[in-house]
Image (spheres, grey):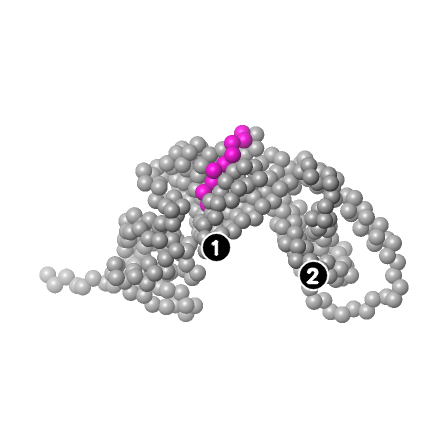
Amino acid sequence: MNQDRLNPSPDDAITDAAAHWCMRLHADDCTLVEREAFARWLAADPRHADEYQAMLEIWQTADLLPRTATVIDFNPPAQRLPQRRNWRPLASAAALALLALPLAGWVGWEQGWLPNHYQHFSASDNTQTVQLSDGSTVELNLNSELTYLNYKDRRQVTLKRGEAFFKVQHDSAHPFIVQAAHGQTRVTGTQFNVWKYEDQVKVTLVQGSVLVSSNGSTGGYRLGPGMQASYRTGDFEPQMAQSDDYGNSLAWRSGKLVLDNLSLEQALPVINRYLEKPLLLADASTGRIRISGIYNTREVGRLVDNLPKVLPVYLTRSKDGSTVLNGISPPPDKG
């Protein structure tokens, strides 16, 4: 565990309290009084909610909490409490819990259950370059989010949404794993890009090698530089491809979206990554229309508005307000 944990600080106390509440609120014998106390603790300082959320995510990632969590009611019905209450058993239990936390944390670290470092990053309107605690760097595309957990036997990133380019610090004894949708990319030190939209994922390798597996594969498939692997939920194995123009997949790092003779069916997941509401296809024939061009990632909305000027399509609105692309049928052959 981190050395500075040997000298307790106010932040350490908040972390210990968050761990305590994480355990109690998911225990079968958690009482209404405890939930009320938790609500008061949560409201006492904005840092409490942030630390509790981080602790909850760590424990869920480590599979230490039940899948069906206890529902926390922050506005429970009023309940008359006894006038006199013996607080000594509660105080003893709390003291034991606080004493047990460091030991539980140490055991969890040694067993590879709990991380000793947690980081969360997100980028909305601007790309962002961040550094992980292991020295690796990550470039986040617009509207992207990930978390990083450092375990004793592995480094684990979860790409929740968006796209990221990784420069991984080499450590052969400490693999670096990126989880995206129902699959993962495993490396020890290399440079690669991971793109995620809904349940679709594409991995592009620039340097070194990576092992990509979908939720159906067991051993995974190894990529060399210039290779790409893609998968989506339910795929038994990822689809592999050697691409001479894989730089198109990395153009976002320069603020560009490159569409190189793609069908609209292929292009829409790439375009939709930058839209608040997804662009839809009216039918399969519209999806077969092809598109090319280089566009600014900050102006994808304008690209959608201009599509009828460059493609045989017109725009309509669905009931939920999404834009729908409709293909224009060519005129009948007069011959």
Q: Amino acid at mark 2?
A: Ala
How many marks the image carries: the answer is 2
Point out which mark residue 124 bears.
1
The one of 29 and 323 positioned closer to us in this rendering: 323
Horizontal side of residue 154 vs 202, given as left or right:
right
Whole-percent x and y of residue 49? 65, 56
What kind of element bears circle 2? helix
Q: Residues within 10 Å of mark 1 (few under 14, many from 20)?
A: few
> Which residue sits at x=40%, y=65%?
322
Whole-percent x and y of residue 50? 63, 54
| Residue 19 belongs to magenta span | no
The one of 136 and 181 positioned closer to us in this rendering: 136
Whole-percent x and y of residue 296? 35, 53
- Which quadrant of the figure has residue 246? top left
Q: Determine whether 158 is above or below 333 in the image.
A: above
> Bounds of the magenta span?
164-172
> Which residue sits at x=58%, y=46%?
119
